[in-house]
Image (cartoon, coloured by chain):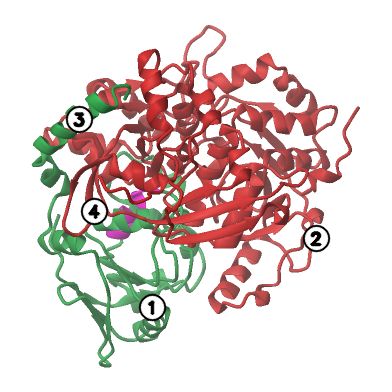
Amino acid sequence: MKPIREVEGRAIPLGLKNVDTDVIIPAQYLKTITRKGLGRGAFETIRAQPGNVFDDPEYKGANILIAGDNFGCGSSREHAAWALGDLGIDAVIAPSFSDIFSGNAFKNGILTVVLPQEAVDRLLEVAKTHPIGIDLENQTVTTPFQDRFRFEIDPFRKHCLLNGLDEVGMTLAQDAAISTFEGRMAADRPWL
Amino acid sequence: MSSKPRTLYEKIWDAHVVERRDDGTCLIYIDRHLVHEVTSPQAFEALRVAGRKLRRPDLTLAVPDHNLPTTARLDADGRRVPIADRESADQLATLERNAPEFGVRYIDAVAPEQGIVHVVGPEQGFSQPGTTIVCGDSHTAAHGGLGALAFGIGTSEIEHVMATQTLLLAPSKTMEVRVEGTLGAGVTPKDVILHVIGVIGAAGGTGYVIEYTGNVFREMSVEGRLTVCNMSIEGGARAGLIAPDETTFAYMQGRPMAPAGADWDKAIAWWRTLPTDPGATYDKVVIIDAADIAPCLTWGTSPEDVVPITGVVPDPMSFADPSKQVAAQKSLDYMGLTPGTRMQDVPVENIFIGSCTNSRIEDLRAAAAVVKGRKVAANVRQALIVPGSGLVKRQAEEEGLDRIFVEAGFEWREPGCSMCLAMNPDKVPAGERCASTSNRNFVGRQGPGARTHLVSPAMAAAAAVTGHLTDVRELEPVA
């Protein structure tokens, strides 16, 4: 995974709340057996509407998405994170995320930034005309107008994102601890 | 171990900690991994590319469900009917190849035990109280009905579980949802969970694991508990659970993969230690009076858009939150509904009784009880009954339920996810409405442009025979 330190660029001001995973990537696109190319189905129902933010030339090449409360609710499909990555999105800012989605995003090197609704509202306004900056090291989101919003992030996730670490490889290094646990389990709960 | 009183969730968590880190994150052992065809191909592929093995194939069970057509799977000569959709066929064939390659037990599409992964797990006794259960599907929460910590995971996590049989997790906050009192006539477990989601909201449980407590859940069957826990994710909670008790043990006993003999006694002794200790506390408590729950349904495109069947389509401006006003208006535009319309005046052209939420034998019995002696209304174009597994189907046929449905004009199908999500041939046409026993009313969930009203099996059956959304309590029994 490539390390992430800073994300800077234009942001798509989507703003909607409860954007579910069926909206991010409809089920008919889940039949793929690879992780690639899902951008073509991303936000299909929104993109069918004229004047939608995703096809607005103003936001062409944007690498940040700003959404409302409960972004990514619904299914566990990691295809939602893959689709965002395929669209070129490096970070999503919202007042809250579904737990499964934020985990999937993290595992694909997409930063999810939780900010209060007032801060998100301000960023939605700025995004219409100006770029936004996210500094993971210092946990801040800034605008060219001197706005500065601090966000919280799980320290472990931050460490992995900053260093581009592969979680499976890290856990495999704990093999001895896992084997010890399995030995204990076989004794305590043999029916499993 | 300290003697501090602990909740059911904390007990299961503590029993599965392989390693605890300074920041509170834990490496958690996974007892059971369920696999289906949609979210697993990329995980198997990643193992293959990295030259990694699947650590515990014996704790893993694979079954196809999402893509399978629900029409006959064998022709008159007993040959497999080819699947017309090439991508679906490829994805199913990929699982069929991956399972033996990695040594995973596989229930194939024509096996009598095949079904929806969340119906098969409990039914086979693979899912057990006190276990940690994962699957690349958010409705894994269902297995919490047995008193297991069960939750959906993404494909990277599937790969992690396959390679290490563990997950790195931060502990969740705990929420108690207590429902006490007597449920009214016609109020089913589905109505209870829809009501709960209406109260807490679609994001209300984000960051929490819910424990459902109170006499309503204690008195509920295991099937009903699976329905309730299944939809925890629709309230934002990754997992929901109900303490295992005598009802759970009676359900578990004798299932093919359940503990037996001396193991059974050991298992049951441990299961009895799991319920939340007196004095244990939750981070949040929600108390609901059972008497306040009516047979209910959804009017919009979020599962929190719940209204009693006696209610009307709400006015978007009636919501205090401005962003909810906008969302509600968008929902109504999509759903083709006008504020003030009585829910019972809304006609439906499609009926779906099935899905991991409501496709178990009790669900089919409840629907059949309403349908018996009646006919599907003339304006209903499509009415599907899709049993959750081959075993549920066989049981229903032994009870004669299939004949009740077929005589009424329903289609009696093969097990699978069917019309719950638009991945197989069962879809709701654009602009048409469906009374559905599934779990999501999202935009396009049942097909592009499809309009979904989430209901209980009894209410779906009632809508089928009247042709419009119907208060099941007002249907007179047919002699």
Q: Which mark is residue B342?
A: 2
Q: Quadrant of the N terminus of chain A?
A: bottom left
Same chain assignment for discs 1 and 4 = yes
Q: Amino acid under label 3?
A: Arg
What chain letter is assigned to the residue under label 4? A
The relative height of residue A75 versus residue B364 in the rendered view (above or below) is: below
Q: CA distance from mark 4 to mark 2?
A: 46 Å
Residues shaded magenta = A76-85
Q: Is residue B354 left or right of residue B239?
A: right
Q: Are marks 2 and 3 on the same chain?
A: no
Which residue is nearer to you in this view: B77 or A57?
Answer: B77
Q: Are marks 3 and 1 on the same chain?
A: yes
In the rendered image, the vertical position of residue B102 relative to residue B160, given as above or below: above
Q: Which mark is residue A116?
A: 1
- Residue placed at 36% from the left, 53% from the top? A100
Nearest-to-viewer mark from 3 and 4: 3
Q: Is B462 on the left or on the right of A13, as rendered?
A: right
Q: Are marks 4 and 2 on the same chain?
A: no
Same chain for marks 1 and 2? no
> Would you call the spot at circle 1 few (<14 residues within 10 Å), some (14-19), or many (20 or more)?
some
Give the residue type at disc 1: Pro
Q: Residues within 10 Å of mark 4 (few under 14, many from 20)?
A: many
Distance of label 3 from label 4 (alpha carbons): 30 Å
**Upstream in sequence: badge 3 or badge 4:** 4
The residue lying at 52 percent from left, 19 percent from top is B73
Q: Which chain can be seen in green?
A: A
Q: Residue furthest top?
A: B77
The location of residue B315, given as percent across then percent down, is: 70, 72
Q: Are the two marked residues, 1 and 4, in contact with CB atoms closer than 8 angstroms?
A: no
What is the chain identity of the residue bearing mark 3? A
User: Which chain shows up in red?
Assistant: B
